[in-house]
Image (tube, rainbow, N blue to C red):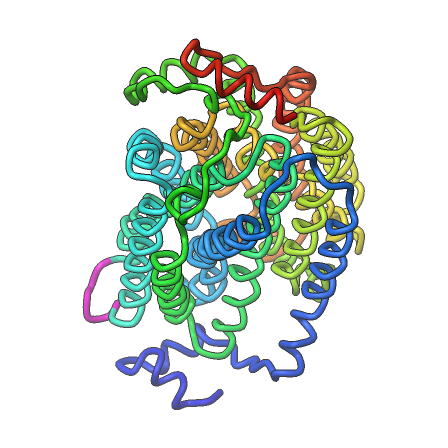
Amino acid sequence: MDAPVVALVCPERAADCVLFKSGKCMSLAALALEVLPIVILLGVIGVVVWRLPKVEIKHSAEFLARRRVNWIILGLTYAFLYFGRYNLAVAKTSLDQAGLMSNETFGHIFGIGSVVYGCAFLINGPLCDRLGGRTTLLIGAAGSAIANALMGLFLFKRNEIGIDLSVAFTVLYAVNMYFQSFGAVSIVKVNSSWFHVRERGMIGGIFGILISLGLYFAYDWNRIILDNLGVNFVFFIPAAVLLVMFVLAFLLVRDTPGKAGLEDFNTGDATSDDKGPALSPVQVFKKLLTNPIIITIACIEFCSGFLRNAIMQWGPTVSKVIPAHHDDFIFNNWGMVNCCAGILSGIFAGIISDHVFKSRRGPVATILYAGLLVGCGCLFAVLHNVMFGVTFAFMSLCVIGVHGMLSGTATMDFGGSKNAGIATGIIDAFVYLGSGAQAFLLGRILPDVTRDGADYAADPDNWYVWPLCMLPFILVGLGLSIRIWNATVKKEKKKESAPALEKEAQAE
């Protein structure tokens, strides 16, 4: 172990910090080899997307170039929010080894954070619709950066502060998750003014890719940081990156084409023809919460939230305690595998939504939930063997695809550009309420080395409760997805908008 680095991480008690840093330094060649599959996959997918038949929406070259800059910066900011969200899961490994964070403590911290995230939409959804997605994205990036910096600072000075880690992290992570909740509503709000309904299937795919890149940053970059610098920097570095993205978003992101010096256009969503005065937040909530399609999507996404974190948060934990999976390539490269899986699922979902199902989102969710059902069935047979990691990678692919298609696209369609913030907030609230439910439930009932002993946790037979808990949520999500198979946008047509409708009809 490099003593100077340990001292840098925790100068007041360097001996205690041995557990906070593995010393597995990664060479530049090894790092390049890890990134290479993602770069190749993105390149291949870029060629495939470029060769697809174009959706019949014509934009100028200037518009396309400016939109590309807008969503790349917007998307990277969103991806780096994940970098500062799931870093807690990576830090848990070292904190657990140091006796500071058990499975139950982690479940408690993440569960409360998820509930805060889910409930924050009551404030943040209306704020996003009122202030604009750019402003709320900047608020989210700055707030999350500060919260992450404070968590890193607490670990750096915890012996001097004298507050129990579980208390400090419960508060700070909840603050982080409040600001994190601005991310999804902001990206959907901005993109709703830049993309027509018939272009949004691919945007749902890109949303899934952004989630996947965020998971790669969160799991693999933070693992590299942990191995080389220490657990403090798992929070400090995401904070610094988010501040950089804050500056770039401030300079380059704009809410609408009009604010970027271009011409606004009719996006064809639920409120694109609504020229009347804006509704109050209470009226929008009432309108959306009485929409059976929105409510059905919200319930599907509650199931997706439960499943997504049941898969992504606990998979690596299982691989560390069951000896048969200690050297499993998939879990040792969990961020990269999740990224590749999410890229594939996002593009698959976007292509079949726009080009096979005529911009309907229900069929895509149904297919992916059917995949989750197959994967869950396989889990009961593969907990003992190498196919365990493969099965989990496939399930991760399916659940990321569902989330990108419903939270990233359907919210724009059925909420409309005027109400995209609140609509996304409602859907994302259900996602994280589901995440919170799984954190509290699985944190208590899954085998734990500290509580149950290493031998008990290492026995694969004691983990069958895990897929058993996921199965009901998969069945409910599949049934509800089938119910919205034929759901399409019904635009609000008002008298004031008749000339615009006639003009659009002639253009088409």
Q: Give the side of residue 362 with respect to residue 137, left or right.
A: right
Please say if 505 is above or below 8: above
Residue 302, above or below 152 = above
Residue at the far left in the pictured view: 161
Say left or right for 408 vs 105: right
| Residue 385: image location, x then y, percent | 80, 53
The image shows residue 468 at horizontal and vertical percentages of 66, 32
Residue at point 40%, 26% (across, down): 419
* Residue extent of the magenta highlight: 158-163
Observer-nearest of 207 and 54: 54
Instruction: Depth check: give the residue in front, 413 or 308.
Output: 413
Q: Is residue 507 visible?
A: yes
Q: Residue drawn 27% across and 49% down?
A: 171
x 19%, y 66%: residue: 161
Report the quarter where the C terminus lies. Answer: top right
**Is residue 52 or residue 183 the one in the foreground?**
52
Provide residue 79's location: percent of width, then percent of height.
50, 54
**For residue 187, side relative to residue 387 (left or right):** left
Name above or below for residue 243 compared with residue 139: below
Q: Main secondary structure of the magenta part?
A: helix
Dividing the picture into quarters, in which one does residue 340 lie? bottom right
Q: Is residue 405 magenta?
A: no
- Horizontally, is 83 left or right of 371 in the view? left
Asked if one can make out residue 102 in the rendered structure from this viewpoint, the answer is no
Q: x%, y% of residue 343?
A: 67, 51
Rendered image quadrant of residue 476 = top right
